[in-house]
Amino acid sequence: MPRLLHRYGCSPGKISARGCELNDHLHTAWEEMEVYRLAESSKGAGMSVRSKVFARGAHRTLNAMFADESTAPDDLIHVTCTGYVSPSAAQLLVVEKGWRQQTRVTHAYHMGCYAALPAIRIASGFLASTTCPSHRVDIAHTELCTLHLDPSDHSPEQLVVQSLFADGHIRYTLSDGSGPAPAATPNMAHSGYRVLTLADELLADSADDMQWSVSEWGFRMALTQHVPEKIGNALPAFLVRLFAQAGLDYSAEKEDAIFAIHPGGPKIIEQVSDALGLRPEQSAASRTVLFKYGNMSSATLPHVWNEILESGAAEPGQLVASLAFGPGLTICGGLFQVER
Amino acid sequence: MPRLLHRYGCSPGKISARGCELNDHLHTAWEEMEVYRLAESSKGAGMSVRSKVFARGAHRTLNAMFADESTAPDDLIHVTCTGYVSPSAAQLLVVEKGWRQQTRVTHAYHMGCYAALPAIRIASGFLASTTCPSHRVDIAHTELCTLHLDPSDHSPEQLVVQSLFADGHIRYTLSDGSGPAPAATPNMAHSGYRVLTLADELLADSADDMQWSVSEWGFRMALTQHVPEKIGNALPAFLVRLFAQAGLDYSAEKEDAIFAIHPGGPKIIEQVSDALGLRPEQSAASRTVLFKYGNMSSATLPHVWNEILESGAAEPGQLVASLAFGPGLTICGGLFQVER
C-alpha cells in the first residue's frame, strides 16, 4: 500500500494537510470507527450511517459559521455535493436562529466542484429580482468529501481520488453593493469582489470522463486521465468568450489578471496554466489553497478567492478570472474585479 | 397485506392510477425484477442499481420532453429529489442537442415536493439578471418516487407512503413575456400565468415531522401524522403575507381565487381547504391531479397548474395561489395570475 500510494497518490509536497470532519481518519482503533468498521464490511458503513454523519457535521458547521451572526440573511443558499439530508443544516439553522419568516433557503446540491459559480448565478438572480437595496444573499458550502472513500478499492484511479479530497466549509455574502458592507476581517486588504460576468460550457464527448453518483456505500466518483487535457483544450476559447461577455478583450487583459483555478489536483492547475500560458504567480493562490487544505470540492474555489484577498497580492480593480470543472464535463467561469 | 393496505393505504377512489418508470411494478416474475429482487434481498437492490435506473429514466424522459424542440433554452433547471447522477440527464440532453455553449444547466435537487416554487424563484432571478428580452428558462422535473420503496417495511407510515407516491415528469418555460410566446397546446384555454410573487416559511418544532435522506436501499422518507395539522395552522397567516407581498388583500381576493394545493395525499388537501374555508371547486384541480396521477413529488404542482388551464375553469386575470410543503417543515407559496 505505501508503494502504491507513493506511486499514484498526491505527495505531501503538493498537499500538506487535509481536514476531515469524521474522527475515523485520525486513529486506528478499528472497533471504535463510526464509518470505517472494516471488520464488519471492507467498504465501511452504508449510506444511512454516512447520511447521519453528514447531517451532524453540516449542522455543526453551519451553526459555527453563523454563531456570531445576529442579522437574518434574506436568502441562504446551501451548497454541497457530498450529503443530502432534509431538513437540511440550512433549514435547521434558520429555524434555530428564529429567521423562519425572513430567510429563504435554497439548496444548490449535486453540481460538483464548480458549484460556487452556479450558486453565485442563483444569488445574483435573487439580487436582481428585488428592489430592496439591503437584500443579502449568504452562500454556505459544507463538503464532507472524505465521507465517501471506499477503503476496499485500491485502483490507481481511486488512490488518486483518496489522496486529493478533503472536507471543507466556507461562507460568503452577495449584496448589490448599495447596502451596508459586510465587516472585513482585520487582515484582509480588500473587502471583496464585484461580479462582472459568469459563463458555462459543456464539453462534447466527455460524459464518461467524470461521474458522481449515489451508491450504497457512499457517493462514487469515476475519473479518467483525460480530464485535464480536455479541459485545457477548451479553455482558451472559453476565456475569450467570458471576457467578451464583460466587454473586455481577453488577450489585452490576460497578462494583468489573476486566475482562480479550481485546484482539483496539482495536474489540473499545471495543465490549465500551460494551456493559457500563465506566469506561476498568476495562479499562486490555487496552489496555496491546494497545499493548505486539499481539494474540498465546491468549497475550494471560494477559499481561493479568499486567499487572493488575504495574501495581499491583488490590486484594487484587478481582474480575477475563476475557472472550475465538474461532471459533464462542465466548465464554469466567472470574471470578478477586486473592489477598489 | 390486503387488510393492512386497505386500512392504511390510499384508496382507488382517491388515486386511480400511478405511473412508474420501472417495469418491476407491473409484473410478479420475481427473477426478472431489476430493483425488487426479493429473493436476494428483502429490501430490493441497493442505491447503485437504483441510481442507474434513475439515470436511464431521467435521460429517456428529458430527451422525450425536448424531442421536438429545436431552439436552445438559455437556462435549463433540472428539478428532482429522487435521483442524483452526474452528468445529469439535463447535461446529457444539452450536449446531445448541440446546445453546449448556449444553455446553462442548473440543478435544483433535494428540496422535496415544494421544489417547483424555488425553481421558479431561481428562474425569475435568471430572467431579472439579463437584459435580453428573449431569454428563456426551461424547467424540467423528473421524479422517480417509486424507485425508493422499501418492500420489507410494512409499518403503517410506510404503507401510506407506498400508496401515495408515483413517478411523474413535466416541463415548462419562464420568460419575461416580451419575447416570443411558447406555443400553447390546442386544448389549452390560456397560454400560461404571470408570476406575481413567491414566499417561503419554515415552521418551528417540526424538523422531525418529515425527513428525506439517502440510505443504502434507496432514499428514505419519515413522516408523522402531525404534518397536515401543523401546516393547516400556519397557512392563514402565511397567505395574508403572500397576498400582501403582491399588494393584494387576502380576505378580499380569497373568494375568487383558485388554490393550487400540492396534493401530497387526500388528507392534506382536505385539511388545507378546511383551514382556509375554501369551497370544493377552489381546490378541484389538486384533487383531479391526485386522482389521475398520485403524488409525483415536485412534478405534481406544475401538473395542477396545467390542469387549471386545461380544465377551462380559470378566467383570464384570475388569481391562483399555490401552496406546497416539504421537509423543514417548509411551506412554499406562489401567487400567479392567469394570463389575459
Image (cartoon, coloured by chain):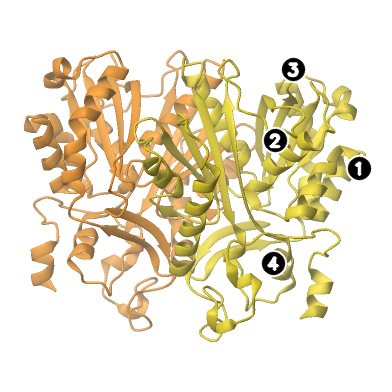
Chain colours: A orange, B yellow
Frontmost of labels 4 and 3 is 4
Residue A277 lies, in percent from the top left, at: 8, 30
CA distance separating discs 3 and 1: 26 Å
Identify the element where label 1 is drawn.
Answer: helix
Residue B140 lies, in percent from the top left, at: 55, 42
Residue placed under numbered mark 1 in the picture: B280
The image quarter in which residue A299 lies: top left
Residue placed under numbered mark 2 in the picture: B333
Question: Which is more N-terminal, label 2 or label 3?
Answer: 3
Residue placed under numbered mark 4 in the picture: B162
Q: Are marks 3 and 1 on the same chain?
A: yes
- Amino acid type assigned to the residue bearing label 4 in the image: Gln
Q: Are marks 3 and 2 on the same chain?
A: yes
Question: Which is more N-terminal, label 4 or label 2?
Answer: 4
- Amino acid type assigned to the residue bearing label 1 in the image: Pro
Question: Which is more N-terminal, label 2 or label 1?
Answer: 1
Chain holding disc 3: B
Left or right: residue A313 compared with residue A323:
left
Identify the element where label 3 is drawn.
Answer: loop
| Residue nearest the observer in this picture, A323 or B18 | B18
